[in-house]
Amino acid sequence: MRTKTIFLSLFFFSLIMFSCKKDKTTEPDLCAQSWATTTQDELTNYSNAIMTYAQDPTVANCEAVRQAAQAYLDALEPYKDCAVLTGQQKTDWETAIQEAKDEIANSTCE
């Protein structure tokens, strides 16, 4: 599994999570706020797995990255229907999630 791709995926999902919040002067969007809260454990586990794999690129650590990435995507999946995602944003969200799932499914740890 390519470490660069993993880091870029992590960055991309983090960017999505925090860029979709509404302006602070408007009514707070509870769905956007809950992304950061409810997926924090999965994001932390994913980040830790990436760092461990980068330091020790074994098959077991690669599998741990794949499992953590899948858990993070599973945690993000319910938020596809949040009100902050409209039109192209929702399409981009669904595409990004599917591409990440496809990459995990097609990657191998050898």
Image (cartoon, rainbow, N blue to C red):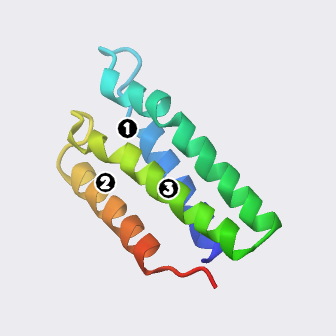
Quarter in which the C terminus is drawn:
bottom right
The disc, 1 or 2, on the residue closer to the chain's N-terminal end is: 1
Instruction: Give whichever of 34, 104 is nearer the camera.
Output: 104
- Residue at 27 percent of width and 35 percent of height: 84
Q: Secondary structure at mark 1?
A: loop
The three-letter code of the residue at mark 3 reads Phe
In space, the residues marked 3 and 2 are separated at their CA atoms by: 10 Å
Q: Secondary structure at mark 3?
A: helix
Quadrant containing the N terminus is bottom right
Q: Earlier in the sequence, mark 1 or mark 3?
A: 3
Residue at 22%, 57% in the rendered image = 91
Crowding near pointer 1: few (<14 within 10 Å), some, many (20+)?
some
Side (left or right) of 86 relative to 70: left
**First reached walking from the N terminus: tag 3 or tag 2:** 3
Mark 3 sits on what residue? 12
Of the two numbered discs 1 and 2 in the rendering, the one whose residue sits closer to the viewer: 2
Q: Residue at x 59, y 68 (%)?
A: 63
Q: Position of residue 10 (x, y in %)?
A: 55, 55
Quickly name the residue at label 1: 20
Q: Secondary structure at mark 2?
A: helix
User: Image quadrant of residue 28?
Assistant: top left
Q: Quadrant of residue 52?
A: bottom right
Name which residue lies at 60% across and 79% down: 109
Q: Give the image location of residue 67, x and y in percent.
A: 52, 60
Say above or below: 20 vs 69: above
Q: Is residue 22 left or right of residue 12?
A: left
Q: Which residue is mark 2?
A: 93
Tags 3 and 2 touching, CB below 8 Å: no
Residue lying farthest right? 55
Name above or below for residue 3 compared with residue 29.
below
